[in-house]
Image (spheres, helix red, strand yellow):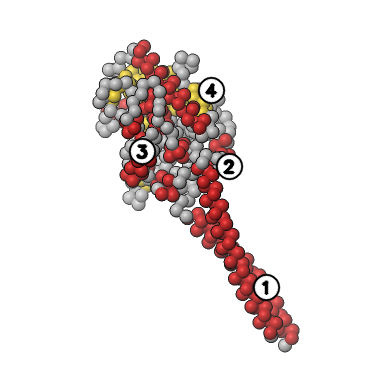
Amino acid sequence: MNKGNNTIINILFEWIYVFFMIQVIFVLLLIGEDIYSGMKESGKRNTETETALLSRDVGKPYSDWEKSPTGSAKYLDGTTVFVSIFLEDTEADWTPADRYLVRKNMNIATDYLKEEGKRYGKQVELIYDTNEHPDLEFHMKYGQPFVEEEEGDAYTDMVLAVYEYIHDEIPVRDIMKEYQVNSIGFLCFADHTASQALTYHYGTEIDSYFYPEISFINLRWESSGENVNPTTYAHEILHLFGARDFYLSSERYGITREIVDYVVENYETEIMLGYSAAGIDEKDRISLDITKLTAYYLGWLSYITELDRFPTMAEKNPACFTMQKDSEGKEVYQAASRLKLEGSIRQDLYFAACGIFIVIQGIFTMRKLNRIRKRQLKYN
């Protein structure tokens, strides 16, 4: 009987010992995770993310058309083709000087994106020059005046007309096959003044008809009459690859007023703040930066420390815009972090480990108790 009591005491000590070891191992894992997170933010490669990005274009060009959550312009890493659409509405008057200005700004913007990519270890290749590649330039006849205001049926009709033109008139499949790419963006240039440039990216909840991603860029600013600078071109192109605006809040995409204030205070040269935020308006170069905030949205970094402070910034996939619907059916932003922020992944791991421990240790305990009973029956 004493032997049986000793065995039960030993079992209790085993439970205590194993449970203690689980705590030790879990603490070590947390320390390792913190160290690894710091390495990722410093720009070192995350194996899982890098593998996913390297394999993103596996397969034939156009093979995943309307299937990838990134939209038509996939990752700003590798090769992307840009198709230029010159909008010829009833008020447009395209001159050789106007076309030269568009190409000049595109040259500066794309060179800038390539150099910024190098800082993050990315090889950005952009095919866009319509002088070298005339098959990438199209002229869209539009029998109505250009509409700048976003609100109203006239504006919606104009935007839908551009989508229809892409679907009906531009041989997207042939272009992607010719240039051996799976990533393509569309730049629609308008010979007009406007108060803003706009990009229509593809979101996970949008109908596949809107899979082509388009940036609308006007020649001049309405407020000053000055030509739109190359910084705006780069800014709008970055939207095609998942970059968020930081100069205004957007609950739809998780950019709160607090985040905007934080970026203005700590990242004043962030290009997604807009050139006016930093007081810079340059015609022949781009002095703003792609900071780690935009690098995260592009998929160039898989983690930044700001995610711990602002969990609504988290995005499920790189180079994507994710929205979900609330209980009333309205489209709202819901963070779907690929890292499960705010410690939830740690809790999941902890409870999973405890559950496994209880099951395994319970099995061993039952076996030992059975042996004790057998011995007791034998001696009795």
- Which residue corresponds to mark 1? 367
Query: Disc 3 versus disc 4: distance between alpha carbons?
Result: 34 Å
- Say whether disc 3 or disc 4 marks the residue closer to the N-terminus: 4
Say which label, 3 or 1, has the lower sequence index: 3
Q: Residues within 10 Å of mark 4 (few under 14, many from 20)?
A: few
Q: Tag 3's secondary structure?
A: loop
Farthest residue in the top direction?
96
Image position of 58 (left or right of 163) = right
**For the point 58% across and 39% down, which residue is it?**
51
- How far across and how far down the image is residue 236, in percent? 39, 30
Sequence-first disc among 4 and 1: 4
Please give the residue where the numbered disc 3 appears in the rendered image. 246
Quarter of the view holding residue 109:
top left
Q: Is residue 35 left or right of residue 82?
A: right
Near-viewer residue (374 or 33): 33
What residue is shown at x 50% (from left), y 58% (from top)?
A: 347
Residue type marked 3:
Phe
**Earlier sequence position, callout 1 versus callout 2:** 2
